[in-house]
């Protein structure tokens, strides 16, 4: 289990565990750096639940499409939130006849097995900005 230490002067709580100032504790989950804990031992390694996270920006509908590969997992949860503009998402292949139109009022969320979906093809329909998060399911 990874070991995290609270090197601050305040109590930190995360994922049902609490660390007092200067306390170190081994846990069976991954704690993101934003929590404020310092990882002091990584063995055994715990896989991060996040596979893909970030923003994709397009300047106009003529920008080339982006391919987003799922990565190594059995199942995943994908979340696509358009902040501005319109985007078209196709599962697996850029010539998939089923296109999902994603807008600021129509976001897209999917839970699937990797054997069903291995990648997403994202094409701008206008100038657009989209937040994307793909995480392992069940972690």
Image (cartoon, helix red, strand yellow):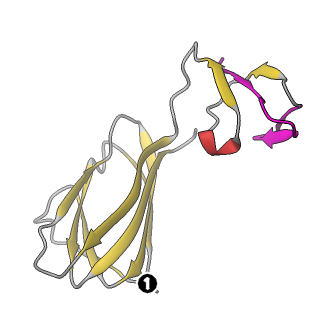
- Is residue 101 one of those drawn in magenta? no
Can you tell which quarter of the image residue 108 is in?
Answer: bottom left
Rendered view: 49 above or below 79: above
Mark 1 burial class by Cα count in 10 Å: few <14, some 14-19, many 20+: some
Horizontally, residue 19 falls left or right of residue 85, namely: right
Along the viewing direction, whichever of 71 and 40 lies nearer the viewer: 40
- Is residue 6 one of those drawn in magenta? yes
Rendered view: 2 above or below 118: above
In the image, what residue occupies the spot 78% across and 21% down?
Answer: 25
- Residue 50 place in picture, x, y as percent: 48, 44
Along the viewing direction, whichever of 136 and 15 lies nearer the viewer: 15
What span is colored magenta in the figure? 1-20
The quarter of the rendered structure image containing the C terminus is: top right
Q: Which residue is mark 1?
A: 104
Can you tell which quarter of the image residue 45 is in?
Answer: top right
The quarter of the rendered structure image containing the N terminus is: top right
């Amino acid at each position: 289990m990874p070991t995290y230490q609270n090197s601050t002067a305040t109590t930190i709580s995360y994922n049902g565990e609490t660390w007092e100032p200067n306390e170190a504790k081994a846990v069976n989950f991954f704690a993101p750096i934003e929590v404020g804990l310092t990882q002091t031992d990584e063995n055994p390694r715990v896989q991060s639940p996040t596979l893909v996270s970030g923003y994709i920006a397009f300047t106009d509908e003529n920008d080339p499409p982006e391919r987003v590969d799922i990565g190594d997992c059995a199942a995943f949860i994908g979340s696509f939130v358009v902040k501005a503009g319109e985007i078209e998402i196709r599962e697996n292949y850029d010539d998939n006849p089923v296109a999902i139109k994603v807008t600021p009022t129509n976001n897209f969320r999917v839970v699937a097995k990797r054997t069903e979906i291995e990648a997403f093809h994202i094409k701008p329909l206008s100038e657009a900005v989209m937040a994307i998060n793909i995480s392992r399911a069940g972690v």
